[in-house]
Amino acid sequence: MLDLIAVGECMVELWSDQPLSETPTLNVAYGGDVLNSLVTASRLGAQVGLVTRVGTDPFGPGLLRAWQAEGIDVRSAPLVPGENGVYFISVQADGEREFTYRRTGSAASAMRPEDLNPTYLESARIVLLSGITQAISDTAEATTMEAARVARAAGVQVAYDPNYRANLWAKRGGLAAAQRAAQSLLPLVDILLPSHPADHGLVNASPGEDTLERYLNCAPLVAVKRGEEGVTLAEGECVTHVPAVPAAHVRDTTGAGDAWNGAFLYALTQQRGLLEAARLANSVASQTLAYRGAIPPRSP
């Protein structure tokens, strides 16, 4: 049995400390929201697996080797004809980043429901799904929904990070399409992992309205990530705020929320309490801020 299986896209990451228009070099890595979460969970000790499609371009075999080196099971991540998505990061002085994507038509975006192996998904304690996976194509959205159905039918918990990206959804109908996708999936979700205010609009909240009450009705367990303000946990009528762990140094905020998800879900699979899980996740997310790129280097 695996602790955590995620369904999504991982892309080649090319990043620089300088504006892309000026940099003479690019650093090569990889990243993707659910993949980032899996790496975090694996490093903490979880058994994890990834469901995706990997293009046979020059990057593909290296991606698979890198994931395997991180302890990720790739039996459901086949090499298929096609290209892998690529994204560029230009990091600003305050740690915020600017993204440029080249992912249209990627191998992962061609995921289809029939690609799923139900037996594999049923072997997990938790299946992690993402709004980004929903956004990259119609077939990927359908695959996300089917993965949730399979998991729910097998008694596997479904975790969902809406991870709303306006630019990504713009090609598929904008906010209204993202809302529709989220609302369709939420009845199958056990653990909801939204970010505030990024995912504010997905629950039809008006500007300035506290979205927590709306989130409470969306899933049995809700963890609203609020950046420097920490996280708000809600399970039933019990609502608890867990303060953030101050970062000693902020170099890059890329992937911090994904790391939070990975650490939190890992702790839940180990039967730790919600407060302990959130405190661990806050600490892990804070530590990632000191490093460039979506995935920090391994500890010595």
Image (spheres, grey):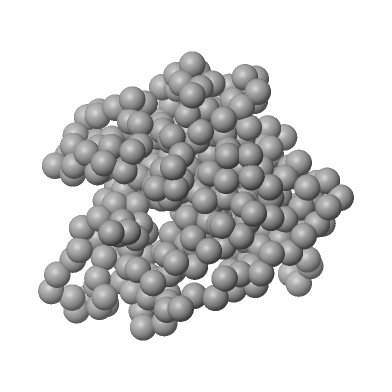
Which quarter of the picture shows residue 209? Answer: bottom right
The location of residue 183, given as percent across then percent down, is: 69, 42
Q: Quick check: can you spot residue 27?
A: yes
Number of residue marks? 0
**Residue 90 vs residue 189: left or right?**
left
Q: Residue at x 26, y 41 (%)?
A: 69
Q: Residue furthest top?
A: 119
Residue plotted at (25% across, 55% down): 29
> Can you say which quadrant of the picture contains the C terminus?
bottom left
Residue 28 located left or right of residue 164: left
Q: Nearer the viewer, residue 190 or 247?
A: 247
Q: Is residue 95 above or below residue 214?
A: below
Q: Position of residue 263 (x, y in %)?
A: 52, 51
Q: Nearer the viewer, residue 23 or 254?
A: 254
Residue 27: image location, x then y, percent: 20, 63
- Residue drawn at (18%, 42%), measured in percent from left and top? 62
Q: Is residue 101 visible in this depiction of the protein? A: no
